Image (cartoon, helix red, strand yellow):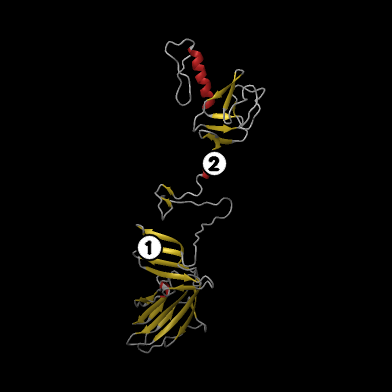
Amino acid sequence: MSDDATPRLSLPYLAAGQAQKHVTLNESLALLDGLVQTAVESRATAAQPGSPTDGDLYILPASPTGADWSGKSAGTVMRYEAGAWAELPVSEGCIAWVKDEDVAVFFDGSAWVDLASLIDALQNLSMLGVNATADATNKLSVSSSAVLLNHVGAGAQLKVNKNASGDTASHLFQTGFSGRAEFGLTGSDDFTVKVSANGSSWNTALTIDRSSGRMTFAKAPTVTENAPSTLTYASSLTPNLSNSRAFLVTLTGAMTLNAPSNPVAGAGFWIRLTQDGTGGRTITFNSAYKFPSGVAPALTTTAGASDMLYCVVVDAATPVIDAALRKGV
C-alpha cells in the first residue's frame, strides 16, 4: 500500500505497479463514505455501542469508554464497518449533522461547534450593507427596489427612537441624495411635515401639537372647490359642479338656470347673479330648484345689482336642489 495520501482528507493514493490496489481504493472509499455529507448518530454517547450498524458515525465526547474508543480525544469521529471501528481524519471546516439532536455542527480545527452559533456573530455588528456599502453615518445601508417588513402573526411596528426632545426621529425623502420632504419629530416632540426645493431651505407645512393634537398649518389651506368660477352668460345656463362649487355670472339678458351637471347628494354650491349696466334682466329657474315658499323668487333688477343663490343637492338622481336667494348683496 502506498504511504502517500491526499493532503486534506488523508485519502490514500494508489501507487504505480501496486499489488492489491483494491485494498487502497476501498480504504479511500470508506473514508469518503464517512466524510461526505457526514451524519453522526450522536456527539454525547460516551460508551462504545455494543451492536452498531455498518456506516454508523459518532463524534466522541470527553472520556469515551470501550475497547476502540477509550483514550480517544473529545471531538474524534469514529466510523464502524465490517466489525471494526476506524477514526476519520476531519479537517477544519468539516460539517456534520447530529441525528439525535437535529442540529448541524462544524469543526473549527479543535472542537465541534453548533452551526447556529455563527448567527450570534451577526449580533452587534458595527455596520451592515445589503447590496450597498454602509458607512459611519449610515450604519445600515440597503440598495433595493423594495423593502418588506412583515408581521410574524399579528401586527408590526417600525420604530424610530431618538435620544432627547431636541433630536430628530423622522423619515426623510430625497432626490439624488438631496432632501425634498420630511415628516416626524424634527427638533421637538411635536409632529411636523416639511418640504424643501433644494435640500437646504425647508418650509414647515404642518405641525401637530403633542399635548393637544391641535394642527397648525403654515399657510391657510386653499379650498379650490370654493374658488369662484366665472360663467359666460347664456340664455340657457348649466353649471358644472365638477369644475367648481362657486360661480359668478353677469346677466346681459333673460336667462334660464338649468339643474347643474354632475350633482352629488349633499354637495353645496352658490351662484352670484349680477345685473349688467342695463339691468332688468330676469331669470327662470329649472323645476329642480326648490325654494322655501314653493315659489321661485324674482331677481333684483337694478343695474349692477347682485343676488346670491345658495343651493344644496338633496337628491342627485332626480335631481332635487334646496335653494335660497339672498337679494341685494
In front of the other: 49 or 274: 49
Image quadrant of residue 178? bottom left
* Image coordinates for residue 303, horizontal then vertical, percent: 35, 88
Image quadrant of residue 222? bottom left
* Image coordinates for residue 160, horizontal then vertical, percent: 49, 59
Give SS at disc 1.
strand
Q: Are marks 1 and 2 in contact (CB under 8 Å)?
A: no
In front of the other: 275 or 196: 196
Q: Amino acid at mark 2?
A: Ser
Q: Amino acid at mark 1?
A: Arg
Above or below 180: residue 18 = above
Per the image, the residue denoted by label 1 is: 180
Q: Residue shown at 51%/48% (left/top)?
A: 123
Per the image, the residue denoted by label 2 is: 117
Circle 2 packing at 10 Å, graded few (<14), some (14-19), many (20+), is few
Q: Residue shown at 56%/24% (left/top)?
A: 87
* Image coordinates for residue 133, horizontal then vertical, percent: 39, 49
Q: Is 133 placed left or right of 292 in the picture?
A: left
